[in-house]
Image (cartoon, coloured by chain):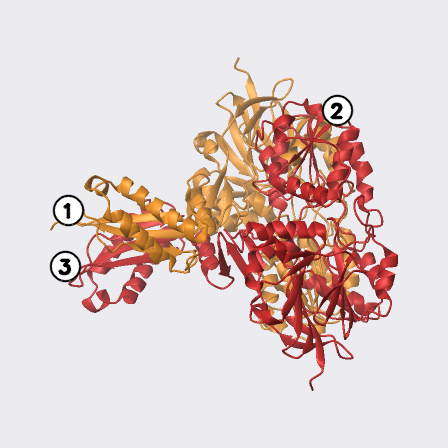
Chain colours: A red, B orange
Amino acid sequence: MSRDRLIYLPLGGAGEIGMNAYVYGYGPEGKERLILVDLGIAFPDMDTTPGVDVILPDISWLEDKLDRLEGVFITHAHEDHVGGVGHLHGKLNAQIHARAFTANHARRKLKEQGHDEGDVTICDPWPATTELGPFKIGFVPISHSIPESSALVIDTPAGRIVHSGDFKIDHTPVLGEPFDEDLFREVAKGGVRALVCDSTNVFNAHEGRSESTVGPNIRELVAASSGMFVATTFASNVARLKSLADAGEAAGRSICLMGRAMRRMTEAAVEEGILTEFPRTVSPEDAADIPRENLMLIVTGSQGERRAASAQLSQGKYFGLEMKQGDTFLFSSKTIPGNEKDVARIINNFSEMGVDVVSDSDLYHVSGHANRPDLEAIQALLDPQVVIPMHGEHRHLREHAKLADGLGRVGVLAPNGTMVDLAGNKPTVVDHVETGRTYLDGATLVGQFDGVIRDRIRMALNGHAVVALMIEDDDQVMEDTWVDLRGLPEAGRSRRNLAEEMERDLAQRLERVDRKTARDDDALESLIKKSIQQVAQEEIGKRPEVTVLITRLTAE
Amino acid sequence: MSRDRLIYLPLGGAGEIGMNAYVYGYGPEGKERLILVDLGIAFPDMDTTPGVDVILPDISWLEDKLDRLEGVFITHAHEDHVGGVGHLHGKLNAQIHARAFTANHARRKLKEQGHDEGDVTICDPWPATTELGPFKIGFVPISHSIPESSALVIDTPAGRIVHSGDFKIDHTPVLGEPFDEDLFREVAKGGVRALVCDSTNVFNAHEGRSESTVGPNIRELVAASSGMFVATTFASNVARLKSLADAGEAAGRSICLMGRAMRRMTEAAVEEGILTEFPRTVSPEDAADIPRENLMLIVTGSQGERRAASAQLSQGKYFGLEMKQGDTFLFSSKTIPGNEKDVARIINNFSEMGVDVVSDSDLYHVSGHANRPDLEAIQALLDPQVVIPMHGEHRHLREHAKLADGLGRVGVLAPNGTMVDLAGNKPTVVDHVETGRTYLDGATLVGQFDGVIRDRIRMALNGHAVVALMIEDDDQVMEDTWVDLRGLPEAGRSRRNLAEEMERDLAQRLERVDRKTARDDDALESLIKKSIQQVAQEEIGKRPEVTVLITRLTAE
């Protein structure tokens, strides 16, 4: 049968929070024309990705189908949706489509990587659409926690798909476009084949709260504070920046933005005409001259990032400013799971300074994602036949699919790599594609299974012993074999120097080595590793990683 | 002035959650007789302590005052209070005092480290006391989340101190001793100089909930489940184990305990006569033969520990048992900050198997620590002049001291190393002592600032380049210099082999080296490091750690 397929294939984001990358395709099997929705990053951690800078989705599947790729569409400017465009544009070389604010960021990212900013096309909101091959795609404004977030309406000959992007239902978002039910009712007309929908907050059963609810609370807190007032939030939450700055201004404080991301976001918002009324700010350099009770800093680093302004301020002077007893520090944010210890470190540092810290309070932060009631509401509005949960860990996707089933729709559980055909009577899984992660490590892309990161983790857990030895041209092992230890204690149970103990044991073993072994690098290496690990086990109860460097002298 | 001092000195636990170790002393300055209350551990993580097995408080201050140490008192058998006794008994060599259940654990720990079990004395509860030097010490039963937790009444010539230990106010704890207000009123008679008090839950403003509230919820959940039912909780929460097992039995299920800690805890509770009525259990080996709908497993690993039973079950077959669609997994526990990702990994694995996971629900878990209202209540009961917050991060201690101040008492903020004299009219900080952490790393104790762990972290972040070169006896550098890379990519920007690029660059530089440099190991090493890091920076945008091994050939 050669009917056309309408495929959905997540390459990232469906099985994790972060790293969003979703493929849609339409056409005969194997010849589908393709678009990619979002190209985000995920963030590394010491446990699994030490030293890595950024985690990217593995897009190999797409790389050998570039002739079929019509374009890339970015729903909004959060790093987990747009962060990969700079690093991966060289591989995809496809035109990027986004609304103005998102495009502003995408262009900067392309520029940073030496690409042409013209490779980003700015799109007007729906009902304007972009036609590419069999697709007609429109950006439908939807409320989230960053300006100009959009759902995508993807029209195909097999029906309409709505890709929600990240969203919440917020009728009073302080800044930018409120959630417009009439608009979504319009979208629903003529029928929605499938809703592909944000799942991150599916376990939260509470009603969603509007961005506008936090402003009055912040205003009250700032008004009641006497010393310096410092607030941190996600730099991309421009509405929150405005609420914070407005509260500072109302309390007669000068506003100072600190941290690169903070300035970038507000600049982009001003450039794109989104941020029109923002209190006048002072530079960090000038802030130090303002009496502390008249000053409000809005700073980066709400997740405890070690180099960001919050962490810097918690460690002492930063731009000539120093927090002290009587000052207030507000986390107008939520701690993302995994960052608890970094955030606690900052709070404890401030506590030692005598600074009052307000953190993890619902009064001063609301989520940008749809809770369960909002997920039910958008299904009711769009009335899709099929619901495919995306953006979430497996547990979120599963719960969201169950929710859809419970509402009488067809919930499809499709984690990364699951290719679903939506063209037939009912959605069908037609393929499983290999997906994964690629690590940007300094300037290099490293594969998840290359062993590079595994080796780093092993050195961190076990330490590293390095052995250098020489073999003379008559295949005699020379006497001076060196052992150098890194990440290992100097001495163990015997209290004797550990490296010297290893050298002693090695010397004894090497003395007895026959010529055949001495000629065989692998045999020597395995003998040496055994010696090192045996001594280590006895002395320190550990098995270090071992590197052996053999130099063979040749007669001249 | 030579009046006697009553000192309080936290060596661990006051500035962190974990690693509790508190010194009390009485006598003339510098001649105080001393006792140590608790000797716990903290747990390592990849961010700060990769490869470390256990974190111990640095007790150097105590080590050169052993002639003044009267004894060690352990409040309860949680690892952060008793976990260090085995590892540090060899250094302290002081008699350990504890109630029977706690002593049972302390003895096992001594035995494991080759010490004499007789070094643990079993104490009866207050009003029984132990007299040691100027101290009279009694164990006052207090409710917590492990059997036989105790507050200590420490009587000295300068007054009575109550050291709360970890506690909550629970009048119906399911198992063991309820919180007895009359007993604490008795303790309060004659006046309490200072209450040294658990601070971990000071930010929680809710009423504490009793252990007895979770049983009915668990029973309902188990009764409504159809497949296999598996629950995890803290193994030491013997009351919870009983609630879980009772719920299983009521639903007609056979109970199977899995995980070493689970068996140890129940054995100790049976041995000490605490656990008298527990449903009959089946062994893991026999469990596989029981129909899954008639089976309930109670397993270790509520914090996502990688080798524990929960993690094993989430990865496939374990003792012949395999979870599947229709089964239920209950976390009857709270995820401790820092463990979120490990717990999420397990939940997602189960989600992929189709298992229904119930987690982080207040219905099935209550905290063992005193919330703010309970902290207020115990102050009201004991009416202490002074309150010294202990066991908590700095932010907890500070908040707790503010709470005490607000209640008209003298709150003393005394983080680790702060020596407070409680003998005078008002508490005075009389000294600051150096404190810190010692790492048990395999079989060796490693200091926090020895550089061993720092080097491991650096290798994990930056990778490790190893260079071996030889110098001939005429101070000529030999040609075959080797570079070996670990935790670094094979190739960078130029796509050429990175180690070979480094060797090439090194060869060029070494060729030009004069005799003076060639004779100087330090000069050579710094030249080599520069070369390696420069090539690395160009090729891969990273600066690896570098180890240089120089071998000098000598004329025979």
The chain letter under disc 1 is B
Query: Which residue extends farthest bottom?
Result: A1
The chain letter under disc 3 is A
Discs 3 and 1 carry the same chain letter: no
The amino acid marked with disc number 2 is Gly
The disc at residue A92 is: none
Mark 2 to mark 3 CA distance (whole Å): 89 Å
The amino acid marked with disc number 3 is Glu
At x 85%, y 58%, the residue is A183
Q: Give left or right: position of A254 versus A549.
A: right
The chain letter under disc 2 is B
Q: Dividing the picture into quarters, in which one does residue A125 lie?
A: bottom right
Which corner quadrant holds the C terminus of chain A? bottom left
Front in this rendered view, residue B339 or A206: A206
User: Residue tagged by mark 2?
Assistant: B408
Mark 1 to mark 2 CA distance (whole Å): 81 Å
Which corner quadrant holds the N terminus of chain A? bottom right
Front in this rendered view, residue B170 or A276: A276
Residue A467 on image: x %, y % = 30, 54
User: Residue tagged by mark 1?
Assistant: B474
Secondary element under disc 3, as helix, strand or loop, is: loop
User: Residue tagged by mark 3?
Assistant: A556
Viewer-nearest of labels 2 and 3? 3
